[in-house]
Structure formats: C-alpha cells, structure tokens
Image (cartoon, rainbow, N blue to C red):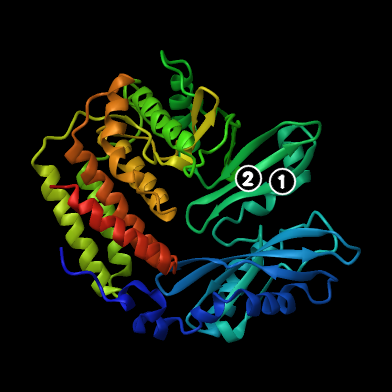
Amino acid sequence: MSAPAAPDALEPLASARLSRRLPHLGAALDPEPMRARLQRLLLDGSGLIAEACARPRAELDGDLCSFQYPLRVRAPLGGHSELLALGVMHPSADAAAAFARSALAPVAARWSPAQAPAPRAMGVLEGLGMAVSIFPVNAALPALVEATDPRRMAEALGARLAGVDLVRLRRSGGAVLLYRLEGGGDLFGKVGYAATGEQAREVLAALADGARPVACPQVLGRCAELDLTLISRVPGRRPDLRSADDLEAALDGAARVAAAVHTSGIAAGPAHTLEDELARAALAVAVIRDDAPELAVRLSEALERAGAAAARIPAQPAVLAHGDLTPSQLLLDGDRVGLVDFDGVCQAEPAFDLGRFLAYLRAALARSADPAGEALGARLLAAHTAWGGPAASRQRVEAWATASVVQMAAHRWGQLKPARLRLACALLEDQLARLT
C-alpha cells in the first residue's frame, strides 16, 4: 500500500475542489452561528427560542450536502422541546430557492403541526445556498408528514398515541419512528425501507420458530401508501463496548445469532458475493475520488489487496446472511440476545457477516483506545463454530472486513468527519496487515 496520506488528504474541508463547489461548508458546520440563522429563518415571530444547536450531521451527495441540526427550543410559556432542522446546501442561492419551491413546498403544504406554537415549515438561507425545513418536512421522504401525524396514525393503528418520536433519519436510507401508545406499549415504524416487507416477514418468522430461536422483531403490518412498515420492539439494550462484560457478551451474542442465521436454511434475499462487496466499496470510493484523489488511491489499493488475498481461498457455499451485522444491531437481554434491522438479508458466505461485525467492533474499540480488538477475530470465529455455524476462513473473513473498513473510510470523508476518517484509515492499515 502507498505511504500514508498527508494530513490535508484526511481533512475534507481542505479539499480545494470541494471548497470551490460548496464554499460555505465550514460556516454550515459551526453550531452557534447556525443556531442564530435558524432562529431568524424558522422561529422568529412564533415565540419559540432556539437555546442551543448541536453539531450537525452532514453528508455529501455530489454537488449537494445534507445537514441535520438538532435544536433545543424553549416555548413562550416555558418548557423545552427538541426540533430537528434539515438543510440541503446547493452550489448557489438560486439552486437552493428552486429546490425549496419544487421539492419542499409541496411537502410543507401537507404538514399539520401537532402542537402550537409551531415553527415555519421551510425557508432558504441565501447566504449559504441552503434550503431548510423542519422535520418531518423532508423532500426525500414526503410520506413522513403523514407517518408522524398522531391523528392520522391513531386511525391507522386503531389506538391512541401518546407521541411519535424520531429514532433515526438517513438522508437516502429512510427513517425509523417510535410510536408510543397511550396506556403503555410501543412499536416501531420504518418509512422508506422496502426490504422490511414480505421477504423480511418470512425470514423473521422462520428465525423465531427455528431450533435456536433468535429474538428478532416481527412485521406487524405494511402501509404501501405511506411506504411504512410496522415492526415490534425487541427486548434488550445495545452493548456498552467499554465494559469488558458487555464486550464478551457482544462477541458471543454475535456468534450465536450469526450461527442461527447461517444454519437456518432460509433461501431468501439476493445473492451477494465478495466480488459484489468489493464493487460496492469501489463505488463508495468513486464518489469521493475527484474531491479526495490521494485518499481514493489508498482505498482502491486496499480493495485490490483484499481481493487478491481472498482469491487464494475458495468461497464457502452461500447461506442466509443478515447483511449488516454490527454491534449496534445486537440487543442484550440477560442470557438472551436479539438481532434487529433485517433490511439487508441476502445469500452470502458466512464470512460476510463475521467480517462486517469484526470491522465495526474494531472501529468502536479503537474510538475508545481499547487494544482488545486485536484478539477478537479468532475468538469470534471459534465461537461461531461452537454455536454450530459453518467454519469460516480467517483470510476471507478479513477480506470482507477490509471491504467494510474501506466503505467506512469513504463514508466518513463524505460525512465531513476528519477525526473518524483518520481513525478509519489507521484501522485500515491494521486490517491490511491481517490479510497476509
């Protein structure tokens, strides 16, 4: 692999090409000035006061950059609430205004705020070339305005709602909502996740009834009009990887659920090979190549090395794979373990799930400066076999893990996260050493 890149190659805002295309990115990432701008644009005149703005989540997409600004807002009569402002930065103010008129305004016209006073639904920060809206007004997921309306959803669910909370919003991958029911209980709604339809229903039901049942969500219903799938909650909590006990439980739990999935015999989902995964990683690198050419060269070389190392070992037969097995998908509940988010189910060799889990586990441990990540690979593979899973080649597992780390690095660049990018690149250097 080439020598480590210069520091500027790992700092997205240092990219001259990106700065020419979107010159106001630095200003958009500064929380306090953005708090003031969003106050004037969306809240002035309503009596609502934005007291704080957290650092936004950002994501580049060609000539655009999307932002999520969490706001802590005080009401006129006291009390606080959380609002989420959504920004889409364009190369010019005219482009931002055109986007607001054509994409945001029709969605905003359908929004009926559940509480008063309410912010303005949308506006344009001309000096930044940014069209802004208040969640749930979202051009990428227009159905959110209905899916978050307590009155509309109470009718759809046949139950009164105590509230609707946003759990996760992805720029291009959908939203997860939590519907809290009056009198107790809740369920999740996924908007924009087509894979949680009939195919996922079949997989989840089969896993729940298997010889080694996995605690997993059940599909409760589907509303095609809102692109909404309703799913049950899985008991448990996500592992705290800073805890030695939770780390051990996560490692064993991942092996247990992976073995159950891999031996289920369920023939659902598309085929997905290591070559497919390397191609998917190459596409992620291609997205940043023009803006970060030096980093793109490093990442492309890593993919070539992963492919060459894996080619020396034949692939295992394909089985049902989770497709996105990471520590955040596990839920610990005493001696039981649960698994969520079956949107990526496919037919792949077991090394896919094991390699992806290792990549994200090592990244999480690296963020907390925990050196335990080095010994995890052999332990995970041994536990997977002990739980009855098919034996997996260490070399192919590490090749799949390398593809995941390359995607991680490319995505961190596109998310304008230099610290996380540097960590991913350091992790990649260690990962390549494991391929030999």
Looking at the image, which is closer to me, 114 or 69? 69
Mark 2 touches mark 1? (CB < 8 Å): yes
Which circle's residue, 2 or 1, is located before the other in the chain? 1
> Whole-percent x and y of residue 154?
76, 38
The answer to whether residue 25 of the structure is visible from this angle is yes
Q: Which residue is mark 1?
A: 164
- Quarter where residue 131 is shown: bottom right
In the rendered structure, the answer to whether residue 6 lies left or right of residue 231 reads left
**Considering the numbered disc 1 on the image, is that residue within a helix, a strand or a loop?**
strand
**Which mark is on residue 177?**
2
Specify few, some or many for label 2: CA neighbours under 10 Å numbering under 14, 14-19, or 20 or more. Answer: many
Specify few, some or many for label 1: CA neighbours under 10 Å numbering under 14, 14-19, or 20 or more. Answer: some
**Hey, what amino acid is under mark 2?**
Leu
**Considering the numbered disc 2 on the image, is that residue within a helix, a strand or a loop?**
strand
* As drawn, 15 above or below 367: below
> Whole-percent x and y of residue 82?
72, 59
**Hey, what amino acid is under mark 1?**
Val
Rounded to the nearest angstrom, the CA distance separating label 2 from label 1 is: 7 Å
